[in-house]
Amino acid sequence: MIRPELLADVVERHADSNAIFTTDTGMSTVWLSRFVRMSSDRRLLGSYNLGSMANAMPMALGAQALDRDRQVIAFCGDGGLSMLMGDLITAVSEELPVKIFVFNNGRLGMVKLEMEQVGLPEFGTVLNNPDFAKVAEAIGMRGIRVTNPHDVDGAVVEALAHPGPVLLDVVTNPDEIALPPKPTLEQGWGFAIAKMKEFAVSPE
Ligand SMILES: Cc1ncc(C[n+]2csc(CCOP(=O)(O)OP(=O)(O)O)c2C)c(N)n1
Ligand SMILES: [Mg+2]
């Protein structure tokens, strides 16, 4: 099982020193903010206070259209990407060499966590995803799918070196928890209750 932190850290290590990053609203926001170092030359675009999902890929398209020579990297959730997936065609038709990295946890992960921290068992947050790399290939862009942690580094290097648009579909751990900087006892208690309820529903 691939930890999303690994992907964020590997991207940080291989990205250009003047890359433009975009991030969806969801757990990818957390992984980017914890692992990707910003500098005066890098740029970061997100929805943030507006809190809208699905923004990372279209923001990347816009940024790349302004500067085709600069490395533009989108940190996408699988839920976010699915919402505006048709716009992948724009990357191909406009020849925008965006690097789309999908944190594919098969979940609306942030919402799963929000429910669990108040003691609710996961409900309605499982996503029945297609193989995003195959979708990308069908659309006409390079698609790479990664399911083994040992392949993450090579796949990121390959994606960043690809001259055209590329989608890297990384299957990540759906149970990874993005702890807030100062977790409360109440949140921990809620999480424990949720896990007991989830276990009671599916004991395997
Ligand atoms: C348009 C919109 N719908 C719903 C939400 C509520 N919401 C916030 S994060 C999230 C889940 C995001 O899932 P995904 O893109 O897969 O990212 P993950 O948290 O799993 O990394 C949802 C449903 C929102 N912020 N914006
Ligand atoms: Mg997700």
Image: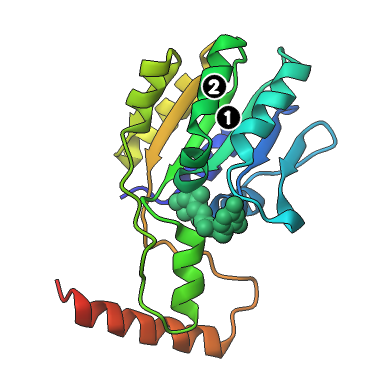
- Whether ligand 1 has any atom under 8 Å from the Cβ at mark 1 is answered as no
| Horizontal arrangement in the rendering, residue 29 relative to residue 89 (left or right) | right
Are the two marked residues, 1 and 2, in contact with CB atoms closer than 8 angstroms?
yes
- Quick one: SS at disc 2? helix
Q: Residue furthest right?
A: 40
Q: Residue at x 78, y 18 (%)?
A: 66
Q: CA distance from mark 1 to mark 2?
A: 8 Å
> Picture coordinates of residue 42 (x, y %)?
77, 33
Between disc 1 and disc 2, the foreground one is 2
Amino acid carrying label 2: it is Leu
Task: Answer above or below: position of 11 versus 49.
Answer: above
Residue 5 in sight here: no
Amino acid carrying label 1: it is His
Residue 111 in sight here: yes
Q: Residue at x 31, y 33 (%)?
A: 131
> Picture coordinates of residue 125 (x, y %)?
39, 61
> Picture coordinates of residue 91 (x, y %)?
57, 18
Q: Residue at x 82, y 31 (%)?
A: 41
Q: Quadrant of residue 50?
A: bottom right
- The numbered disc on residue 82 is none
Asked whether 124 or 34 is in front, the reply is 124
* Residue on which disc 2 sits: 160
- The numbered disc on residue 14 is 1
> Mark 1 or mark 2: which comes first in sequence?
1
| Horizontal arrangement in the rendering, residue 175 relative to residue 44 (left or right) | left
Asked whether 109 or 58 is in front, the reply is 58
Q: Residue at x 39, y 50 (%)?
A: 105
- Quick one: SS at disc 1? helix
